[in-house]
Image (cartoon, rainbow, N blue to C red):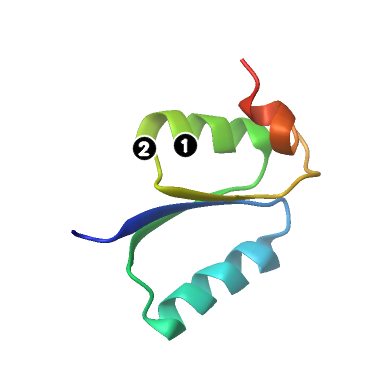
């Protein structure tokens, strides 16, 4: 297994950076981290890359949290 692909969707850049740093410093088996600043970006990245794991902010601009995943 090459590692987990992770999508971090949060409108706060510092949160995305902290998650990335946490994963890297702990040597977690994550091969790729995608970052989205809003719900629309999160949906586009999820459809394009099919991440194994998604950390999704519940409130952010451009389709927040669960609403972003609705068809």
62 w.r.t. 7: above or below: above
13 w.r.t. 52: above or below: below
In percent of the image, x 67 and y 29: which residue is there?
Answer: 68
Mark 1, residues whose alpha carbon is within 10 Å: few (<14), some, or many (≥20)?
some
Q: Which mark is residue 49?
A: 2
Question: In the picture provided, is 22 more to the left or to the right than 51?
Answer: right
Percent position (x, y) of residue 16?
A: 61, 62
Q: Residue 16 carries which label?
A: none
In percent of the image, x 72 and y 51: which residue is there?
Answer: 11
16 w.r.t. 37: above or below: below
In percent of the image, x 67 and y 61: which residue is there?
Answer: 13
Question: In the picture provided, is 9 more to the left or to the right than 23?
Answer: right
Gap between marks 2 and 1 measured at Cα? 6 Å
Percent position (x, y) of residue 7?
A: 49, 50
Q: Which mark is residue 45?
A: 1
- Residue lying at the far bottom in this picture: please name it: 25
- Residue lying at the far left in this picture: please name it: 1
Is residue 37 or residue 55 the one in the foreground? 55
SS class, disc 2: helix
CB-based contact (under 8 Å), mark 2 and mark 1: yes
Question: In the picture provided, is 31 more to the left or to the right than 22?
Answer: left
4 w.r.t. 42: above or below: below
**Quarter where residue 71 is shown:** top right
SS class, disc 1: helix
- Residue lying at the far top in this picture: please name it: 71
Percent position (x, y) of residue 27?
A: 36, 81
Mark 2, residues whose alpha carbon is within 10 Å: few (<14), some, or many (≥20)?
few
In percent of the image, x 42 and y 77: which residue is there?
Answer: 24
Is residue 6 or residue 38 the one in the foreground? 6
- Total labels: the figure holds 2
């Amino acid at each position: 297994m090459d590692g987990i692909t992770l999508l971090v969707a949060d409108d706060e850049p510092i949160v995305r950076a902290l998650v990335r740093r946490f994963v890297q410093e702990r040597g977690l088996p994550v091969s790729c981290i995608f970052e989205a600043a809003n719900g629309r970006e999160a949906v586009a990245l999820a459809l394009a890359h099919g991440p194994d794991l998604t950390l999704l902010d519940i409130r952010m601009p451009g389709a927040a949290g669960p609403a972003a995943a609705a068809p």
